[in-house]
Image (tube, rainbow, N blue to C red):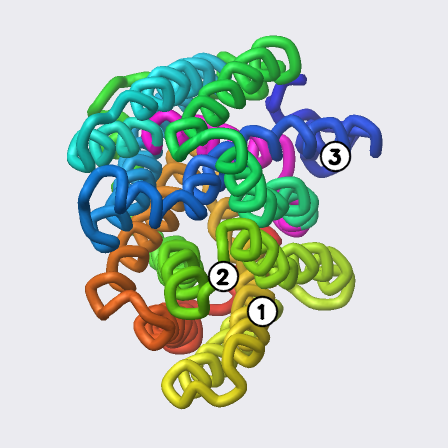
């Protein structure tokens, strides 16, 4: 399955994905979904154990939340290196190396004696899964473009969207049989399974003649070209800002729901699953919307709705009106809006740079998880309660909408949607 562009007699060039059967596309979604899912699993399986880690390592909730930040930081920084490497060496080698690092770091987490050591190991975990995240996105761009990319990415998110929902529930199940260190044993086992999938289930999609050579100098030139594309930079920034809102919820939900509202680990897993269900439903609804609307139109509307829902969330958090029920309904609406935005922003950005898909995916992913790394600890810094979580969620959505409405029109709506 080479990703080289092919042509048919006199027709416009098409990508290999356009020639795939429905069954081949479904298999691709499952394989790539597994690779992207390891990122959310690495972050979210750990959530029900946060209070237990706080007690076991004699530390503070804010310090424990930094282990989430460390993972997100590893995901962000790791992609900046893996992306150019995958453009130069192909997709499979960086993927396998990253998965091996993830397995090793996960096993070392089992024996972490202090919160500082755990922080460092979580960064290494993030670097490892960064390879899986950026390679999976680059493979989709190798094979598809434009609205086809958005549709496949939406299908891909059906698989990966289940990961944030299942991860805390899976983590809660693990905690029934072992302590928090058992979560990392489980993550290591999943990493070993994905190595097997990479070896036997994913062919190389970047043909040798399409690979970039030239080492560090060539990498700098490619990044420079990306940063000079104002529409690309604006869309990437939008992704980072709504990711900050999403991960503020991920980081704060355990303490808000378990400590402020008194849920146990199992109840938290179920409530977390229910609150994120809107995200998955919205991602799939996006496939239907793409039949009538462009990705840019959907993205803009989703951000406006998400920001409005964020202010409703902040109102209920401050007033306490309606208790947990109104808080969860508001979060459901915010996450649903993020679900509509998430496939379309990468589609708009990635379509512009198919010639450097790995590097473009790396920058996109780095900003996404970098935004998450900034948003997650802000909840703890502001106090760790529902008001703090709502403030960061609303702030991220508001900033994303401002960039979308004020910056993207200035670089040209038609430009931003070129090729879609």
Tell me the chief SS of the magenta region: helix
Q: Position of residue 152 (x, y in %)?
A: 68, 43
Q: Nearer the viewer, mark 2 or mark 3?
A: 2
- In magenta stretch: residue 138: yes
Against 213, residue 115 (above or below) is: below
- Graded by Cα atoms within 10 Å as few (under 14), some (14 to 19) or many (20 or more), the crowding at tag 1 reads many
Looking at the rendered structure, the secondary structure element under dot 1 is helix
Q: Which residues are magenta?
A: 126-150
| Lower sequence index among marks 2 and 3 | 3
- Graded by Cα atoms within 10 Å as few (under 14), some (14 to 19) or many (20 or more), the crowding at tag 2 reads some
Residue shown at 38% from the left, 37% from the top: 362
Residue shown at 40% from the left, 14% from the top: 100
- Graded by Cα atoms within 10 Å as few (under 14), some (14 to 19) or many (20 or more), the crowding at tag 3 reads few
Looking at the rendered structure, the secondary structure element under dot 2 is loop
Q: Name the residue carrying label 2.
A: 263
Q: Name the residue carrying label 1.
A: 332
Against 147, residue 318 (above or below) is: below
Query: Can you tell which mark lies on residue 18?
Result: 3
Q: CA distance from mark 1 to mark 2?
A: 18 Å
Query: Can you tell which mark lies on residue 141?
Result: none
Res. 196 in view: yes
| Lower sequence index among marks 3 and 1 | 3
Q: Is residue 143 left or right of residue 100?
A: right
Q: Is residue 420 left or right of residue 406?
A: right
Q: Position of residue 81 (x, y in %)?
A: 29, 28
């Amino acid at each position: 399955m080479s990703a080289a562009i092919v042509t048919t007699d006199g027709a416009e060039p098409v990508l290999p994905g356009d020639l795939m059967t429905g069954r081949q596309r479904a298999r691709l979604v499952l394989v790539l979904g597994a690779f992207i899912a390891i990122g959310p699993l690495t972050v979210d399986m750990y959530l029900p154990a946060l209070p237990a880690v706080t007690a076991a390592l004699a530390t503070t909730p804010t310090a424990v939340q930094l282990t989430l930040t460390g993972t997100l930081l590893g995901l962000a920084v790791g992609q900046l290196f893996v992306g150019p490497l995958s453009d130069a060496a192909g997709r499979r080698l960086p993927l396998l190396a990253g998965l091996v690092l993830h397995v090793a770091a996960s096993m070392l987490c089992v024996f972490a004696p202090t919160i500082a050591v755990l922080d460092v190991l979580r960064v290494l975990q993030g670097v490892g899964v960064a390879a899986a995240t950026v390679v999976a996105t680059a493979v989709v761009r190798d094979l598809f473009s434009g609205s086809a990319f958005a549709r496949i990415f939406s299908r891909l998110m059906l698989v990966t969207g289940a990961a944030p929902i299942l991860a805390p529930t899976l983590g809660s199940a693990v905690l029934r049989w072992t302590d928090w260190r058992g979560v990392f044993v489980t993550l290591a086992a999943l990493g070993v399974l994905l190595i097997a999938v990479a070896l036997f289930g994913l062919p190389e999609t970047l043909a040798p003649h399409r690979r970039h050579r030239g080492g560090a100098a060539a990498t700098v030139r490619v990044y420079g070209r990306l940063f000079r594309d104002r529409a690309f930079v604006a869309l990437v920034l939008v992704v980072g800002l709504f990711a900050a809102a999403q991960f503020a919820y991920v980081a704060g939900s355990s303490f808000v729901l378990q400590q402020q509202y008194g849920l146990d680990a199992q109840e938290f897993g179920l409530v977390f699953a229910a609150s994120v269900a809107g995200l998955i439903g919205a991602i799939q609804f996006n496939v239907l919307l793409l039949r009538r609307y462009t990705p840019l139109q959907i993205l803009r509307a989703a951000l406006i709705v998400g920001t409005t829902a964020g202010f409703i969330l902040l109102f209920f958090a401050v007033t306490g009106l309606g208790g947990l029920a109104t808080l969860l309904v508001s979060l459901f609406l915010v996450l649903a809006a993020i679900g509509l935005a998430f496939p379309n922003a990468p589609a708009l950005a990635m379509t512009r740079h198919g010639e450097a898909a790995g590097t473009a995916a790396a920058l996109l992913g780095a900003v996404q998880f970098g935004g998450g790394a900034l948003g997650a600890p802000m909840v703890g810094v502001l106090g760790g309660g529902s008001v703090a979580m709502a403030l960061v969620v609303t702030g991220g959505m508001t900033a994303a909408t401002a960039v979308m409405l004020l910056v993207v029109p200035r670089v040209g709506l038609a430009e931003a949607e070129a090729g879609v």
